Image (spheres, coloured by chain):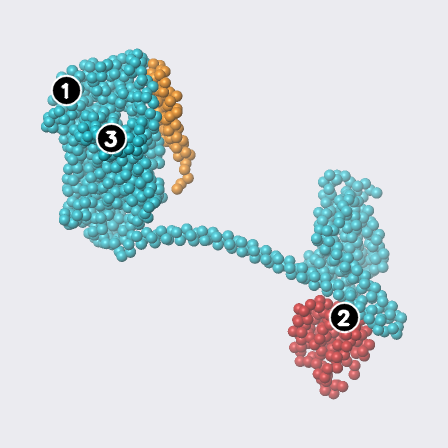
Amino acid sequence: MLQGWFIVTVSFAYIGLLFAVAWFADKRAAQGRSIISNAWVYSLSLAVYATAWTFYGSVGRAATDGVGFLPIYLGPTLTMLVGWFVLRKMVRIARLNRTTSLADFVASRYGKSALIGGLVTVIAVIGILPYISLQLKAVSTSFQILLGYPEVVMPLKVGSVVVMQDTAFYVALFMALFAIAFGTRQLDAAERHEGMVAAVAFESIVKLIAFLAVGVYVAYFMYDGLGDLFARAAGRPDLEVLMAPLGGAAGSYASWVWLTVLSMFAIVFLPRQFQVAVIENTDERHLKRAAWLFPLYMLAINVFVLPIAFGGLLHFPLGNVDADTFVLTLPMTQKAEGLALLVFIGGLSAATGMVIVEAIALSTMICNDLVMPILLRVRAFRLSEQRDLSSLLLDIRRAAIIALLMGGYFYYLLAGEAYALVSIGLISFAAAAQFAPAVIFGLYWRGGTRTGALAGLLAGFSVWTYTLLLPAFAKSDWLGADLIEHGPWGIELLRPTQLFGLAGLDQITHAMIWSMIANVGAYMVGSVLRRQSAAEHVQATLFVDVYQQTGEPGSPWRGATSASALQTLVGRFLGPGRAVELFTAYARLRGVKGVDELEGDRDLVRFAELQLAGTIGAASARTMVATVAQEEPLGLEEVMTIIDEASQVIAYSHRLEEKQGELEAATQELRAANERLKELDRLKDDFISTVTHELRTPLTSIRAFSEILHDNPDLGPAERQRFLGLVIKESERLTRLINQVLDLAKIESGLAEWRTAELDMREIVLEAVNATSAIFKSRGVRIDTRIEPMVPSVMADRDRLMQVLLNLLSNAAKFCTPGTGRVEVRLASDGDVVRVDVEDNGVGISPENQALIFEKFRQVGDTLTEKPSGTGLGLAICLRIVGHFGGRLWVESEPGRGSVFSFDLPIPASDARRLVANA
Amino acid sequence: MRKPSLRAYRIVSLFMLGCLLFNYPILALFNVGATAAGVPVLYVYLFVAWGIMIALAAVVIEGGS
Amino acid sequence: MAKRVLIAEDEPSIVTSLEFLMRQCGFETRSAADGEEALSLLATFRPHLVLLDIMLPRRSGLELCRLIRDDAALAGTRVLMLTAKGGHRDIDRGHQAGADDYVTKPFSTQDLVARAKALLADPVLHLAPGSTPGDSP
C-alpha cells in the first residue's frame, strides 16, 4: 500500500493543505482580520524550533546518551522566561525600525553598516547550510525507508547514487519551490508573511500529534507502559548506562551546561527563530503566552523521546537500524501503516516548516544585506536609474532560495553521512550563537561599536569554522583527517578539536568555549579601541533606549528633497502603484490634499527611508535615500558632536546649578554668621564703651569736688558739706556700678557661684520687704504684701533671689510719687510655678520701652525729680538670675498708671505637691 | 528606565531557579540508577522540574499584576 | 560785663561742680540737663561759651555743636566739648562738628578752667555772639 506514488501524493496533498492555510491567513490579513495576531498562533509558530532534527534526531541522540538531548529544549525554556525583557526589546526595536531580518537588525544597531549586514548574512548562510541539509537528509531518508515498507531497510550511503536519482536532490528542489511560493509572492514594506506563519503554526500541531501518537503507540501498545519499557531496558546491561548517563554517556556536566547555553542563544539567533519571534511578531504581549506555552510544547514533544529510544533499542538489539529512524521504523515493524505515514507527514512538517522559514529569512538577508548593497554601490549596474526594482528584488530572493537549498544539498553530499542529525544541527546552533554577543551587548551597552561587532563576529565565525566546520569536512574524507589528528603543518597545539591543547571536551563544548572567548574578546577590544561614529551613536542610542522612544526613530537626515522624487524612489522598490498608495495615505495623515502638496522635509525623508528599509534593509535604504535627498553641509558627525556636547553641557550645567545652590546656601550662612559676629562685636564695643562712660561719670564728679575742696580751703562749711556729700554719693554709685558689672560678667561667663537650695519664698519676700521698708518710709511710699499661706518651695540661691527682690522693690520705690505712692508685693502659686508680683502706681513704662529696660545700661522713665541713680544693670542681672533657675521675668505697665514687675520660678516636679507649711 | 516591577523580579528569580535546577550539582543528585514507578529518577526529575518551571512561568508572567 | 557760660550736662553733680568753677571765675552761668533745654537757652541766654557734654539726652552734644556752628547769630560762641568716652573717635567727631576744644571726663578742674578762660580771652570774641558792637569789651 505504501508505494512511492501514494506517499508522494499524500505529501503533496498535505502541502496543498498548507497552502490553503496560508492563503486563508493572507486573505484574512488583507481584510485586516489577522488570524496570526494571536498568542497561541505566535507560540506555535515559535515551535518551528522543533525541526526534523527534533522529530527524528532526539530519539537518535537519546539512544546513545539518554537525557543528553534535553538541554537543547531546556535552554529555550530559560530564554523564554527572560524573553519578556530581551525579546520584547528586540520586537520593539524591530517594529520601530522596520527591521527585515537578523542581519538587518545587527547592521542597523551598528550604524546601519552594510559591512556588518553582509557579514551576518554570510555567517548565517554558511552556518545554516548544514541545518538545511539535515532537513533534506531527514526527509529523504524517511521517504526511502517508508518506500521499503514492509521491510525495514536503511537507505544507501550518501553519494552512492547519482544526483538525478537522489531523493534528497528532489526534496531540496521541491522545498525550494515551496519556499518561493510561500515567501516571495509579493513584496511588502513590512516584510511580514502571515500566510507562512499560519502554515508553520499548523505544521507545529501536526508534528506534535504525529510524535505523540508514536510515543503512545510505542509505550502503551508495543510495551506495557513506561514502567515495563524501562524495566526491560534495565535488564539489558548495555542500556543500563543510559539510566544515569550524566558524566558518562551524555558527556560531562560542562557539555550539559554549554549545550544549554548554546540552545538559549539558538532560540533567538537562528535566522528562522528571529524571523518568527521578532519580525513576524504582531503584538509584544504575545510573548507572555509564549513564555510558557512554547516550553510546554517542547516538553510535550520530548516526553516520549526516551521511551521511543528505549523501545527502538530493545526492538533492534543488533544495532543495524539507525536510531535516528526509530520514530518511523518502530511503527513499520508493527505494520502500522497509517501511523507510519502520519510519522512521515509529521517529519515532513517539521522539515518543511524549518526550511520555508529559514529560506525566507536567509533569502531576505541575502537580498537586502548582501546583494542589494553591492548592486546599489556598483555604478556599472546603473541600478539607481531603473524605474521599477520590485521584480528584481523578488527575483534575487527566489534565486537565493534555490541557491540555499542547493547549498544544503551539497553540504549533505559532503558531510551528511558522517554525522548524526543532532550533531549537524548543533554545528548550526554554534554558528547562530556567534550573533549573540553583538546583539545582546548591542541591546544593553551603548558603547558597543561597529568595529567591535565586526571583530567579534569575524573572530567567532573564524573559530567556529576552524573548530567545527573543518572537522566536519575532514570527517567526511573531503579534507584529510591529518589536519584533525595532527593539526595544520603538524602543529599539535593547533588541532581544530583540541585547540591549544584543550582536550577532554566534546566538540561542541570545545568550539563554544573558544569561539565565545574570541567573539566576546574581540567585541570588547574592538569597542574600546575606537570611538563610535555619529551614525553608530544614533543607532546605539535608538536600540539601547528603545523604551524611552515614543514614536518612530529619528533619522539623522537633514537633507531636503521633493516629495515626488521620494515617491519615485520608493516606487522603484515597492512598485509605483504601492508607492502612490503609501504617499497618498501619508499626505492624508499630514492633512494635505495630495502628494504634490507634501513638503520634502525631514519627516517625509524619514518616512520614505522607513518604507524602503522594510524592503531592502536599513543600510541600503539609507544609501538609496541619499541619492535623492542631499545632506546639508552640516555633517552628521558635526550634528552628533553638537548633540553630545550639548548633553554634556546640560549635565555639566545641571551639576553647576547644584553646586551654585550649595554655594549660595553656604554664602548665606556665612553672611549670617558674619552679621552675628559683627553684631556681637558691636555689642561688646558698645558695652565696654558704655561701661567706660558709666564709670567716668561718677569719677568726674568725685574728682571735680575733691579738687574744688582742695583748692578752696576757705569754702563755707555748708558748701563744703554739700560737696563732700556729693563725693560720698558718687563714690557709692561707683562702687555699686563696679560690683554690678563684675556680677554681670560673672553670671554671663558662667563663673558665678550658685548656692542652690530649697527655699521658702514667703520668708525671702518678707525679708526683702523688711529690708527696704526704710527706703519706702523715707520716700513716703506705702508698701503692702499679699502672700498666699501655702506656697511650695523652690530651688534657688537665697542671696540671688534676695538681690532680685531688692532690686524690684527699690525700683518700685524710686518711680513712685512720694506721698501717694503705693507698692504691693504678691506671692502666689499655681501648681507649676511660684510667682512674685511687685506692683507700683508710679509713672509706668511705655510699651516700646518695656523690652528695653531689661537690656544693660538702659534706663528709661525718669524719676520725677532727678536722673535715676541706678546703674542700668539691675534688671539685666535680675533677668539672668531668674533665667538661671528656669523662671521668667517680665513687666506689664501702662504709662501714668504704674507697672507690675513679675517673675516666676518653677516648682521642682517631685515637690510639686509638697507644700511648704505656713510658718 | 522605569523601576523594575515585582513581576520583573519574579521572572528573574524564576530564571535563576531554572539555572539552578537544570545544572550541576542538583542534577548529579538524581543521576543515579534508581527508578521511580519504574522510570529512572533522573528522567522523572527532569520532566517534573521542567513542568513545574513551566507552570510557575505561566503563573508569574500571565498571572494578574 | 560778665561772660556768659552755658553748661549743657545731664549729670546733676557734674553740673554743680561746673557751676561752682565757672562762677568762681566770675562768669554768668545757666545750666541745661538735656539738648532741647540747651537749645532754647542758646537762643535766649546767648552764651559766649558752651560747656557741652557729648552725650546729652534728647539732642546730642554733637548735634548741638553743629547747630551752633551753622547759626550765624552764634558765630562767636565757643564750644568746649566734654567727653566721657575719651576715644579718638569721639574727639574726631567733636572736631568735625566744630568744637573749639575738648576735655575728657574725669577732668582736672584747673585744666578745665584754664581752657575755658583761654577760649573766652580769644580775640575772636571781640564780636560777642548776638551782641551789638557796642557791647564788646
Position of the C terminus of chain A, as image quadrant, is: top right
Q: Which mark is residue A147?
A: 1
> What residue appears at the point 21 percent right and 20 percent down from the top-left corner?
A322
Question: Callout 2: residue from which chain?
Answer: C
In the image, residue C99 lies at what x, y percent? Answer: 69, 75
User: Which residue in the rendered view is the most extreme toward the right?
Assistant: A717
Residue A240 at x, y = what percent? 31, 15
Q: Are marks 1 and 3 in contact (CB under 8 Å)?
A: no
Closer-to-camera residue (A509/A363): A509
Q: Position of residue A145 (x, y in %)?
A: 17, 20
In which image quadrant can residue A354 be found? top left
| Residues behind callouts 2 and 3 on a single chain | no
Q: Is there a contact, CB below 8 Å, between mark 1 and mark 2?
A: no
**CA separation, marks 1 and 2?**
144 Å
The chain whose colour is orange is B
- Chain the render paints cyan: A
Three-letter amino acid code of the residue under disc 2 = Phe
What is the chain identity of the residue bearing mark 3?
A
Q: Which residue is mark 3?
A: A486
Left or right: where A875 falls relative to A146: right
Task: Find residue A179 and report its horizontal and vertical position in percent.
Answer: 18, 33
Q: Which residue is mark 2?
A: C107
Q: Which chain is red?
A: C
Q: Quadrant of residue A542?
A: top left
The picture quadrant where one finds residue A848 is: bottom right
Residue at (19%, 44%) from the top-left corner? A372
In the rendered image, the vertical position of residue A645 relative to residue A176, given as above or below: below
Q: Is residue A822 visible?
A: yes
